Image (spheres, rainbow, N blue to C red):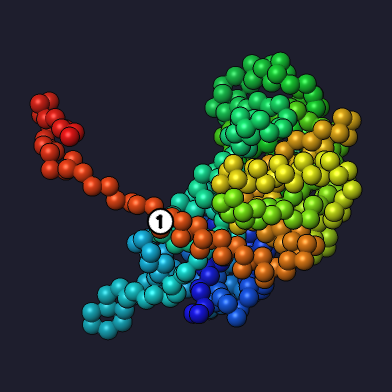
Amino acid sequence: MDKKMLGVIYGSRSCEHEVSIVSAVQLMRNVDRNRFDVTPIYISQQGAWFTGDALLDMNTYTPFDPFKKGLKQVYLDLTAGSGALLHMEQGKGLLHGLKQEVVARIDCFVPVFHGLHGEDGSLQGVFELANIPYTSTGITGSAVGMDKITMKRFFRGMGYPVLPDTSVFRSRWQKEPEQVLQEIERTLDYPVFVKPSCLGSSIGVSRANDRAQLRDSLELAFQYDRRVLIEKGLDKPIEINCSVLGFDGTTETSALEMPLSTGEVLDFYEKYLKGGSSAKGMASMGRVLDPDIGQDTEKQIRSLSEDIFTALDCKGVVRIDYMIDRETGDFYITEINTIPGSLAYYLWNKKGVSYSQLITRMVEYAFKAQQEKDENSFAFQSDILKNVKLGGGSKTKLKVP
Ligand SMILES: Nc1ncnc2c1ncn2[C@@H]1O[C@H](COP(=O)(O)OP(=O)(O)O)[C@@H](O)[C@H]1O
Ligand SMILES: [Mg+2]
């Protein structure tokens, strides 16, 4: 069988740009090269796409120089099924027109983004349009998973356990902050957690114990998003993460992890830097693998994780995070990450699945999803165009047969 070309695509205009680079370079080093070739595709902070071997070297990003040797700016051909990455160059000689070169043809995209413009459904929309298989969750699941306000409404609607919350738009906060503060206090008791709706890696997340802190927390969160979630806070909850792998009714859960946090928020530093090796991304975070949380709770968390995966029609590998209330023992969903840090490979390693095998499984699910899509009909014959009379007059009518 021909080797398939994987387009590992990452970076983008996101606060989690750097974390995405770490996750992607780590992933590329673990692809089974007997089965796949790899084209790295880096989306810069300005939103330009690049490819080239230089992208495999971490030094390329510190800082990124678009003119560096070994890099080419590319454009994806959006024609359905093409998968071509195009490079344009000014031709030399008399006619010196624009020369177009196909740098690579991608058989399957492996999106390794965290946050906006990549994990949020936007790039997934591009892949759907270009009709190329991709390893992450589809448009809807990605978009709902990215947006904490919508995500929690969805989970609540499904009857899944989430903490009480409320939300505010920035425009309203700027117009009538005092009313907003009063309204939040009428809905929720302190402490509360305040979060930008569409972000991750704990950026802009803070705890407020009183009105003054709430004001500061809202100001902080509104720097990152025009919609903010305010949620009932738990005191030093036990955090438990569970990864799920699969597609369309086939689901499997990973080992569980309990991230170790010293403060009130498992923050950016603890997630990526505390382990001393930022090159490992999320894999370097302090954690307990397979923590003892009691058989019942573990079973419920695993089963709920699989339900969530299916409810959001997820694909590939996701990570669902929970908080257990130390006082009551009840657990709540914190969030779903449809492209988790380091693709949660360390949770699969613990289950005996190597990173290479995990990537291969993700690609297999991507092709399965494409096969399913190809079974749908995208044509519907009707006579509608024959009966249309175009024109600006009020008498123009569209006759629908
Ligand atoms: N309601 C809450 N009560 C207590 N701690 C919370 C609450 N919500 C979030 N946290 C803490 O903040 C961290 C980040 O919150 P989370 O919703 O996961 O945002 P992000 O998407 O940025 O990771 C959590 O891992 C946890 O440590
Ligand atoms: Mg989180």
* Foreground residue among 303 and 229: 303
- For image coordinates 41% across by 64% down, the residue present is 76
Tell me the SS state at disc 1. Answer: loop
Q: Position of residue 322 (x, y in %)?
A: 76, 41
Residue 368 in sight here: yes
Q: Is residue 240 above or below residue 179?
A: below
Q: Position of residue 151 (x, y in %)?
A: 61, 37
Q: Is residue 317 above or below residue 228?
A: below
Q: Position of residue 70 (x, y in %)?
A: 53, 78
- For image coordinates 75% across by 35% down, the residue present is 332
Left or right of 394 in this view: 210: right
Mark 1 highlights which residue? Answer: 375
- For image coordinates 65% across by 53% down, the residue present is 251
Task: Name the quadrant containing residue 192.
Answer: top right
Task: Name the quadrant containing residue 275.
Answer: bottom right
Specify the amino acid type for callout 1: Glu
Within 10 Å of disc 1 (Cα), the crowding (few <14, some 14-19, many 20+) is: few
Look at the image and tell me in which quarter the C terminus lies: top left
Q: Is residue 39 above or below residue 164?
A: below
- For image coordinates 46% across by 59% down, the residue present is 370
* Foreground residue among 58 and 41: 41
Q: Position of residue 80 (x, y in %)?
A: 36, 61
Left or right of 113 in this view: 132: left
Q: Is residue 44 above or below residue 396?
A: below
Residue 42 in sight here: no
Left or right of 366 in this view: 292: right
